[in-house]
Every structure is written in C-alpha cells, then in structure tokens.
Amino acid sequence: MSKKQGKVALSILLAGSLFAAVGCSSQSSGTDAGTGNNSAPKTGGTLSISLDADPPKLDPAFSTALVDRMVFQSIYDKLVDVNENGEVVPMLAEKWDVSPDQKSYTFTLREGVKFHDGTDFNAEAVKFSLERGMDKASNRKNELNDIEKITVADAKTIKIDLKQPFAPFLSILSDRAGMIVSPEAVKKYGDEFLNHPVGTGPFVYKERQKGSSITLEKNPNYWQKGLPYLDSVTYKIMNDANVALMNLKSGQVDITNKFPYKEIENVKNDPKISVVNEPGQGYQGIHLNTSKAPFDNKELRRAVDLMIDRDAIVKVVLSGAGSAAHSPFSKSQFAYGDSDKVEQPNVEKAKELLKKAGKENGFSFTLKLGTSPTNQQVGQMIQNMLKPAGITVNLEKVEFGTMLEQSKTGNFEAVSLGWSGRPDPDQNIYDFATKGGSNNYAQYYNPEVDRVLKEARQEGDQAKRKAGYDAAMKILNDETPYVYLYHDHNVFGVSKSVQGFTYYPDGLIRTASISKN
Amino acid sequence: MSQTVIDSQQPVQTAAQAESQWRLFFRRFAKNKLAIVGALIFCALLATAIFAPLIATHDIYEQDYNSVLAKPGNGHLFGTDDLGRDVFSRLVYGARLTLQVAIISVGIAVLIGVPIGLITGYYRGVWDEWVVMRVVDAMQAFPSLILALAMAAALGGGFYNAMVAIGIGFLPSFIRITRAQVMTVRNLEFVQAAKAIGASDWRIMFRHVLPNSMAPLLVQITLAMASAIIAEAGLSYLGLGAKPEDPSWGSMLHIAQGYLNIEPLLAVWPGLAIFLVVLGFNLLGDGIREVLDPKLKR
Amino acid sequence: MRFLVRRLLLAVPVILLVTIMVFSLLHLLPGDPATVILGQEATPEAIDAMREELGLNQPIVMQYLKWLGGVLQGDLGRSLVDHSPVSELIWQRLPATLELTIGTFVVALLIAIPAGILSATRPNSWIDYTSTFFALGGMSVPHFWLGMMFIVFFAVKLGWLPASGYVPFTENPLANITAMIMPVLATGLRESAILMRMLRSSLLEVMHADYIRTAYAKGHKESFVIFRHALKNALVPVVTTSGLIVAGLLGGLVITESIFSIPGFGKLIVESIYNRDFVTVQGAILVCALMVVMVNLLVDILYAVIDPRIKVGKEAEQ
C-alpha cells in the first residue's frame, strides 16, 4: 500500500463499505475480500454508471440517442441479442427459422416471461411492439420498413414476412427495433409511456431526476435464473468526462461510459480503476455536399480526402483510442477490410487533382462543425492539413439542432457529422450513400452504388455481402461524397470492485450479469 | 471621449472655464490610485493589441503535433495547447479580440440605446411608459446570458453575431440611464433657455441635453465593456462565439476545461488575462465615477 | 397603495412581452423541433407526422395563443421532447437552483455587509483600499473561471470536495452540502463584490447627511449611529437593485450549473433551447420572469416600508 495509503483510506471513507481489498493483506475487517479468487458473484448492492448525456426518451420506438440505448439494456429485452463476438444469439426468442427465400422469419418465444407490470410476454406483445415501431411517427420505421406482415401463430410463435430479403433484419432486432414493450403499459400511459417505461428486462424503472439520474431496481421475476446480481442500478448524468473520472476515482461512480482520452495512459497502474478501450462500430467524418459548388466536383472532393493525415488526428485528438478510417466499417464488423485502408497524405497528387478541376490556385469552403472541443480540434487540424494544397477552410461552429436542420436541407458545403454505428454494416452505409437515403446529406447518387448496396442487403451469405461492400466502397472512395476520418473506440472506466463487466461490440453496458464486491 | 466631457459644459461656460474643468477632472483622476491602475491596464491591453505581432513569439496558427500540451519552457513561455500551438502568443493576439468585443458590443448598445433613451426621456408620454419602458423591463426580466445564448444560436455561431447578441443585452441599461439623465437635465435653465429662443427639439436633444448627460454614460460604457468581455468569454466557454482557430480567451478556457486534471495551467492563463483586463475596466469606470461625482469623494 | 396597484398593472404587459419575446426568438432559430427531436435517423414522413402531432403546422400566432390560453388556466403545456408536463420539469429543477441562489445570497451578504461597513466608515484607510480592491477584483473574475480554479485546487489537487455530482438535499444532506460549497462560493464571491460596492457608496453618501452629523453631535457611539441610522437608509439603493441581481444571477447560473453538473433551472432552459423545446423554454422563462417581477415588486414594497417619502412617480425615475 505504502504511498497510496492516504488515498485509499480516503476512498474508503467516501465509498463507504464498497471498497474491495485490493492487494492489501492487513485489511480484514468489514469488507468482503474476494478479488482474485473466482468465487460466485456477490449479490446485492447498487451499481452507479455515469452517462455523458441525459437520455432523452426511454421509449425504444421514439429513441434518438445512443445514451437511451445504454439504459434500455437494463429495462428492455430484445427478441435476439448479440454476443461478445457480435454474433446474433437468442434472447426473448428461443430460436428462429428463416425460410429458404429469406423472406419469412418464424420466432419461437420464451415462455413464462412477464413484463414488469405483471402482464404476460407473448406473441401478441411482440406484434404490438413491432407494429409500434413501424408506425410513421416512430424512429424505427426505417429499420422495419421491409416488414410486410406479422402473424401470430400461437402465444409462443410469431411469423414475420418481409417484402424482400433483408440481411440486417436479425441484427436490427438485437437493438431498439427488437425491444418488446408492455402493450398494457403503452395503452395505460399513452404519450407518457416514455416516462413510465415497462419491459421484461433485468431491472425495473423506478424514478428519474431529469438531468441528474435514473434509478432502476432489480426485477425479482427475471426470466434468467439467478440474474440480475445487483439490487439496483443508478445512471448518473455527468456531461464532462473529467468529472465522471473524478467521481470514479472517489468511488461515487462504478462505471463511466466515456473516458478522457488523455487520461488513459495515466490510469494504467491505478489500483482501483481499469480502462476498457475497444473498437466501436461508428465513425467520424465530413459530408461534402455534391449538389453544389465547390464539391459538385469529384476532383476537389478527392483532393480534400487526400490531404488529411488521419493518423495524426487519431494520435492528437483521440490519444490513440481509435483508428484511421476510410470506410464506415470498423474492425468489429465483417465488412471491414481493405476498403478501410488509408492513403497517406499526398500534396503532389492533390495539386494535380486541383489542376484537373481548374483550381490550380486552390479554393476555399466552409466546414460546419459542432461546438464540442473534439469537433473543434478535428476542424482546426483539417484546416491546417489542407493549407499546403492551397485549400482554405473556413470553420463555422454550429449548434447541433441548427446543424441537423441545415444538413437535412442541404444548406452547407461541408459538415462534420459522424455516426455512432450499428452491428450490421448495411445500417452504417445504406442510408448514407443511396439516393434519397435519410442520412445522405451529401445528396450523392450513383446508380451502381445503389444497386450494389441493395444487393448486399438482400444477400444472405456474408462473404458475398462483403464483396458487395468492397465494390461499393471502391466507387465511394473514388468519388468521396463523405470523407471518413476515424473510427473512435468505446472507452469505459470501470472500478475494480465491479465483476462481470463484458464488452459487447455495440458498446452498450449489459447490467444483468454485473456484480459488485 | 474626453472631448465630449469638455463639450458637456459648453452651453453655460466659456472656453477658459471648460479648460479648468478639464484640468480639474484630470487632477482628481490622477489622485485616484485605483483609477490610475485601471488606466494603465487599459493602456497595456491597447499596446498588446496593437503590437501583438511584435510581442508574440510564434505563429498563433502553427500546430505541432509532437509537442501537444507541453509544459512551459522550450521556447514556449506558457507552454503549448491541445494542438501544440504557443499559448503565450495566442494570449497576446487574444487581446485584439477582447478589445473588439468591448468596443463593438458596447458600441451597438450605445448607438441604439442612447438615442432611444434620449427620445423617450425627452418626450415622455404613453409610448414611453407603456411600450418602450415595458420592453426594457421585459428584456431585463430575461436573463441576459440566456438571451445572448438564444440569439447566438438563432443568428448562427460566430464572433460578430455573439457581439450583436451581447450588445442587445446591454440595451436596457443604456436606455434607462440615458432616459433618467435626460429627465433631470431637460428642466434645467439652459435647456429652457434654448427652448425659449426657439431651438428645435432635435437640436436641444443632441446639442444640449445629450452632452450634459454624458458623465454617467461614460461610467456605464466603461463598466459595460467589462461585462461584455466576461459575457463573450462565457459564450465562447459554452462553445458559441469566436471561430475555433481564433485565440479568444473564452474559447481557450473552453478547450482548457477538458484538461483540468492534466494541465491546469492551460486554464489559468486565459482566465488571468480576462480577470486583469476586466479589472482594469472596472477600476477605470469606478475611478471616473468617483471623479465625476463629488459626493463619493474619498 | 395606489403605487403598488399601478406597479402590479405595469407588470402585466412586461410578462406578456417576455413571453412574446421568447416565442418569436425561438421561432427565429433554425432547426425545427421535429427535426431536432427525431435526430439523424428520421425520415421525412416521420418529421411531418411529428410536426403535425406537436401542432407546429398551425400558424405561429395560433400556437402562441393556444399556449397562452393554457397558461391562464394554470397549464404550462407539455414538453415537446418527452411529453411530461412543463410545470413538473420546472418543479424538479427548481430546488437545486433555489438552493444555489439562496446560498449565493447568504455568502454575498455575509461578506458584503461587514466589508461595506468597514470600508465606508473608514474611507481611505488600508481596510477601505483592500476591500475596494478585492471587491473590484471579485467583480472582475469570470465566475465560471473561478469555478474551474476551485475544481483544480479543491477537487483535483487537494481532493477535499467532490468535483460535482449534485445530490438532492432530501436524499443526503451532507453530500448535498459538500457538492454545493464550490458553486455557491464561486457565484457568491462575485455577488458579494457587487453588493459591497453598492453598500459602500450609499453608506458614504448617507454618512454625510445632516441627521447623521446630528446623531454624532448628540454624542452617540459610532456603532449606534451606523446600525441605528445610517445602515437602514444606506440599504435602500442596495435593496432596489436586488431585482436586477436576481435576474443576472439566474442567467449566470446557467454556466455555474453546467460546470458543476447541477441539474437546475438554467440548465433546463439551455437544454431546451438546444432541443428546440419551445414549450418548455417558454414555461421556464415565464417562471423566471415572474420571479424577477415578483422580486422587483417585493423590493418596491420594502422600499415603501424603508423609505416613507416614496412617491407615486418614483418608479419612472429609476
């Protein structure tokens, strides 16, 4: 203990009895020694998870934010889940059959599962939840667009017919679109359901202080025997990652969902904290508006792409917690491959492209970006990197709501806007690169890309799908409607008193199997 | 500014009397130690802004990714920032932005607020009481930073929009002060005399009333400049305001907040700079007030 | 009495104007609520459906009148984002902000009154110079920076206080107070500077008045004169400006609350502006304006109590 003694003593005071005796032999009173030996997980206790933003809507049908999905993992179960390797595994559906033409899915549901309000989970509830997501006002409509018909065969069997084969379907059901809500509760609360969320998950919604915390309590009737271990889970809103870290250090928080990149190195040898630093599924980049000057010119788009030193951005902005990107596919996805390879910055080649476009003296454009420090760092670095080619970047800070509106209406030349990522590659590219896609802010259209991407989403075979994405990226990397910059990692700070924390590629924290010493 | 102070006594004074008034003002001012400190700080800000290129040791836009968040030393007096730029040089150039904030935002408030206060205070009546003053009340019941925030968001980010927003936030106080002054001055003998000889309302307002209302306005201008600098820093701190690459002291704080654990000094310098400059304006304003208002004599 | 009735009547157009200002200001913002609420994934159809549901397709004047009609019946409407009643949202956020405001005033008064009296009774002494200098210094420190410096020293370097993490008083009083110390000090120091300056100058003015000289001439002790006569009169201008201080404070708290992650009123307004949640912003600003107007009214009543010479037209002269 030596030097750390004072600090440790303080943390005992602050954290009460929650402290686990880490490598400390003299300590035998009160605390349950247990780290190191693989004894059975301890039950009871409260887990505090800090979130970097207040989840706007605790209703999967209307949710818009990544943080919502964090809380959903505790409240709602999904038809299927993904495992640590990103493979689809059973959850509320015990098994499923896919018809040979890939247009019909038959799910066999788990029996004896109850919603938090005591009503039964069954095929009707599944139909209800899915149809709710297909409603025109729902934010899941796009994901569930291909459903033609939902048929309840019996209480435990449900058949879903698709208009056409849709490969990402199961993967989509492992997220918000596949979360099953209590039909009774929806009828009871109506518009207010999002303030009274009811699912079948391991924890039951208790209360929330808007802007401050969300408290969940153990679901004693959870269908997975023995789970959850914890008595309750509290999500605390801490907008600033540094503040969250301080609270983690002092024991007021057990897990943080964001971690200050520059601190990753510093806590390497911390006896109380470990850092989980894993590739996520999202990416950051810049939409270039292909419908108007200057970026209606392919050469100019390419020139911008060519001048950016992505490794420098990863090093300076992310302190290495990420990787350079040239495609929407991160390492955790099957579509990842050569398409993500980055060309090194090349002034000569960029200047040639400018010359070809008739802009040998360079040109200038306005890059709109969000107000966060990270956005501003990236913007300034890009501004600097484009200078040698004679490209002048005029940075314009825009508040998020305004930016979203301007992106959707095409009122921009270039806008820096990333994507948090989804497990299936289709969900990270289709709506971004095809005609009329909801995220195709660049207003890009290439019939060949549309065709290839459509085929890839209808194809059942992974190898063939990957070939499709490779083909699409080959075109996209040449025409560059979007400049991919980097894939950021999901970085969590986890107290060493937390047991059973497992990283999932979707970057969401599953609380059911977590216990605390 | 000082010219208007002389003018202010014009209608009733000879040139010699004005001259002595002027001297009196300076003599009193020179005795006020705190005001002198304020004036010195102001001059230092002015000099830094003008001679920034000579004082700065580095190109303020030059990034060095191999020396990010460096401690002071190695040619960098105050170390480097998150992108490896020289903090000292950026602070020096920041003086220019700060001066612009003070002048432009307060300028907007003066150019719009003073005439409104002058006219409503001179004519009074229903318009004054039920419209203008109620709007002023409403604006003052509206938290000014929130007003600025909403306006900065409405106008789109950016330095000049932020200044317009801040300037509008100051309007009520300038309208009130001018109006109150006008109401006390309008009944004085020399104004009545001007009326008697048939001077037009406009002439009376701008030639006679306004110059004689100048003293409290001068104080208010100085103090408003101090608040303007803090307000801009606040907006930039919230991520609105100056362009990312421009060295606004508020934006520097915005970035520094992310590194409080690692490099707290990064937050110390721009904060100190804001503090000093605002202190300068406050000391100056306070000093002018004491000099102009004999009741507050020490 | 006539004065107060008039004062109340004048407050009505002020409050109406505030709501109109809020309403038009928010409608000037680019980014319509439906787009912002639905986020990146939204399809055009979903946005249309949302606009319809939120009543955003009606003319602005209709939307305003509808909202106003609700307000007159005591209904602030429902948040565009999560459909919860705005009054509930405000109610949830109010305790933190009230605590912050009260704490700030307590700190401010505890410092300002002794310092103001000391420096006014001993003009040009070292006490006067020091307190004047500190007061001007206090007014000049951006309080968000002060907050950051507090975090650096008390939370990071010394580890005495939690960097943030607001806990409701009812849940854990001790944790609540330790979490509030830094934010309250950061804003309180600044306000104390303003109050102290005002108290000093009005005391100085009063001390020259004839009745004070008379009191001294009668052989009363200094402390008696100050507390019995001078302070009472000197407080008048201080009290009259409290309304403006409250308004300024509420605005300033926006930043304090965001530095220390306090889920207060200011943060609610800012979040709602960012979310284009018109209904919530209107409701919150209405409450805010009402508070300011009420404080001003209270001040006027106090003013009349402290200073019986008050005349009907006084308000117009401010």
Image (cartoon, rainbow, N blue to C red):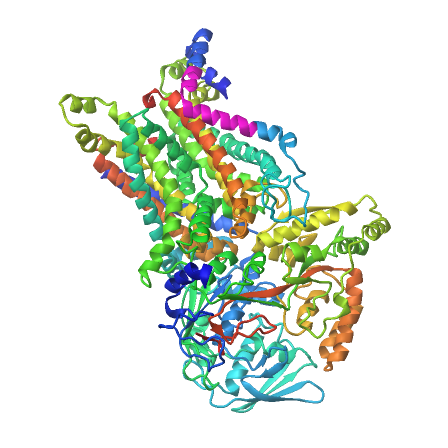
Q: Which residues are magenta?
A: B25-46
- Residue B295 position, x and y percent, is 32, 22
The image quarter in which residue C31 lies: bottom right
Viewer-nearest residue: A395 or A274: A274
| Quadrant of the drawing holding the N terminus of chain C | top left
**Number of marks in the rendered image:** 0
Q: Residue furthest bottom?
A: A154
Provide residue C17's location: percent of width, then percent of height: 42, 45
In percent of width and height, residue A137 lies at 55, 70
Residue A212's spot in the image, x, y percent? 43, 61
C157 is within the stretch colored magenta: no
Q: Is B35 colored magenta in this rendering?
A: yes
Q: Residue at x 53, y 59 (%)?
A: C33
Q: Is residue A461 left or right of residue C182?
A: right
Q: Decide if residue A3 is in sight here.
A: yes
Instruction: Specify the quadrant that holds the C terminus of chain C.
Output: top left
Q: Nearer the viewer, residue A428 or B166?
A: A428
* Displayed quadrant of residue B74: top right
